[in-house]
Amino acid sequence: MHISVNKKTFSEAVHIVSRFAERRTTTLPALSSVLIIAGDDGIKMRATNLETGIDLKLEGKHSSDGVVAIPATLLQQIASSLNQEGEITLEHSGDIVSLNSGTGKSSIKTVSYDDFPSIPFPENPKNRIVLPGVLLKNLFTSIASCASVSTVRPELSSIYLSIEGGVLTAVATDSFRLAEKKVPLSNKGTQGKFLIPAKNALDIAQALPDDDIIMSFDEHQCAFVSTNGMLVSRLTNAVYPDYRQIIPKESIVEAVVLRKDLENALKRTTIFSDTFQKIRVSFDVKKNTLSFFARNADIGESTETLPARITGSSLELSFNHRYLSAVLALTNAESLSLTAAGIGRPLIIRGVGDTSLLYLVSPMNQ
């Protein structure tokens, strides 16, 4: 194999593909490696950790075909050390790859690629839809943090995706808070639902192009195909809880506040939160204010009051401040609506004018 690739193109590809190689110690060195292929389809890089996989096309020239596997960590270090000008050439002979960067030459011991597993592709072509990669990228990165970090309940450490009636709905919850985002689709024919592990979704989001992609899925895998290549993730084999049952149908109070006021009030109040990260939220109908109170026995206490449009009955609830602040990353709306159904019931936050988002936070004990 003999290939020549622009240094910047090579470096960017290595950093993208390496995310999909196995990062833990493994008895199968091929899983911790990046496969470089030169053939009829041009130049490609592949990596998989059996949970996710990538097949990425590279712009470049090759004068002879071949396949070689190089440890991902080593390849990342080399890519990081390159300047961004000129080309890099790789020539494979025996179990050595000679890498010429123009200013230097390295000889790298390769890994046997015979054990490199194939990257599975969804078998059911009916479940496929075309959508902008940037849309899916933003969707995954915004709500993945709301999924559980524990793998005890795999369904809660996953993102639930549902396609129905021309709408893509994404949901993530850790049982303490829940985020639901809806995106209209131009293709109204495809329907289906699946669970993708949140950590896989984040890795995929880092590698997705902004241009249109084809998302396809079956019972076991989902794939994201673009002109640059393919990304694949295994799916979670579990039943997602009926989250709509916990969304209150009615409310007793609603507060509409400016986003910047809420953000500033939370920043100042949370400095004084206790070890449980608890703050108290008070809806005052008579004064038309929303107040935040936090007390820490070691440093003191603080109250922040901001103007709000309040309708309904006065109410006090306590929350983990991290869960309240998380909504700020989910919407760009200038005003936010906070509705509560009563003591012990969840708080619903929506962006005013943003019908795509529903964010739910469970209260703490008073």
Image: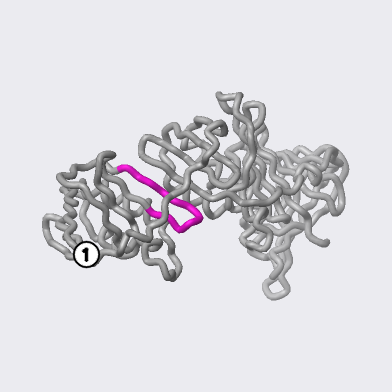
Disc 1: CA contacts within 10 A as few (<14), some (14-19) or many (>=20) = few
Q: Is residue 154 left or right of residue 38?
A: right
Name the residue furthest front: 114
Q: Which residues are magenta?
A: 47-57
Q: Name the magenta segment's main secondary structure.
A: strand
Q: Is residue 146 left or right of residue 28?
A: right
The image shows residue 247 at horizontal and vertical percentages of: 79, 43
Amino acid residing under circle 1: Asp
Q: Vertically, is 216 above or below 363? A: above
When asked about the image quadrant of residue 274, the answer is: bottom right
Tell me if residue 73 comes above or below residue 287 in the rendering.
below
Query: Residue 180 appears at what percent x and percent y?
Result: 67, 42
The residue carrying mark 1 is 95
Residue 52 is covered by the magenta coloring? yes
Give the residue displayed 43% in from the left and 64% down from the top.
Answer: 23
Identify the residue at horizontal 55%, vertical 41% (top origin): 139
Residue 258 is drawn in which quadrant? top right
Quadrant where the C terminus sits is bottom right
Q: Position of residue 95 (x, y in %)?
A: 22, 64
